[in-house]
Image (spheres, rainbow, N blue to C red):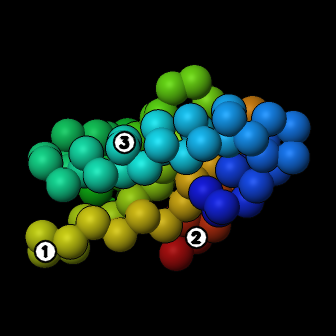
Amino acid sequence: MLTEHVYFLATVNPEAAKRLQTRIMEAIRSLETMPERYPYLEPGDRRSPYRKMFVPNQYLVLYAVQDETVYVEYVLDCRRDYGWLIEKELTL
């Protein structure tokens, strides 16, 4: 998903695409330290394996922590509807 976001932006502004990729990758790498610092996808729902991290200004990274490994599942553009994902997660 990150590749899709960067590629789309690169068609308009290659420099902005590089900055976006760097910003999101730095945020993801920061999960190496205290990945539990971000809330669960649905507040208070510890059944969900996903946590959410917002990357300013418009991206949402959904990830799961298992043992000492962080699995990034989704990189979403918050300007788009991602309600389908929450509905999918709630039915699992």
Q: Secondary structure at mark 1?
A: loop
Q: Identify which residue, 78 or 50, lies in the foreground.
A: 78
Percent across and percent down for residue 80 are 78, 41
For label 2, the residue is: 91
Residue that lies at the very extreme toward the top in this rendered image: 57
Q: How dense is the environment of label 1, judged by Cα within 10 Å: few (below 14), some, or many (20 and up)? A: few
Closer to us: mark 2 or mark 1? Answer: 1
Q: Position of residue 49 (x, y in %)?
A: 35, 65
**Residue visible at 61% across and 57% down in the picture:** 2
Nearer to the camera, 41 or 70: 70
> Which quadrant would residue 14 be assigned to in this image?
top right
Q: Residues within 10 Å of mark 2 (few under 14, many from 20)?
A: few
- Left/right placement of residue 59 relative to residue 64 reads right
Residue 27 is marked as: 3
Q: Amino acid at mark 2?
A: Thr
**Disc number lying in front (2 or 3):** 3
Give residue 73's position: percent from left, percent from top. 49, 67
Counting residues from the N terminus, which is met first, the one under dot 2 or under dot 1? Answer: 1
Among numbered discs 2 and 3, the one appearing first in the sequence: 3
For the residue labelled by badge 2, is the local secondary structure a helix, a strand or a loop? helix
Q: Is residue 52 left or right of residue 87?
A: left
- The label shown at residue 67 is 1
For the residues marked 2 and 3, what is the alpha-carbon distance in whole angstroms? 29 Å
Task: Estimate the spatial distance between the alpha carbons at disc 2 and disc 1, rounded to whole Å.
Answer: 24 Å
Q: Quadrant of residue 17?
A: top right
- Residue shown at 62% from the left, 30% from the top: 58
Residue at horizontal 76%, vertical 55%? 7
- Residue at screen point 20% across, 71% down: 69
Q: Earlier in the sequence, mark 1 or mark 3?
A: 3
Which of 42 and 72 lies nearest the eye of the viewer? 72
Find numbered disc 3 in the image and state the secondary structure of the residue it sits on.
helix
Q: Residues within 10 Å of mark 3 (few under 14, many from 20)?
A: some
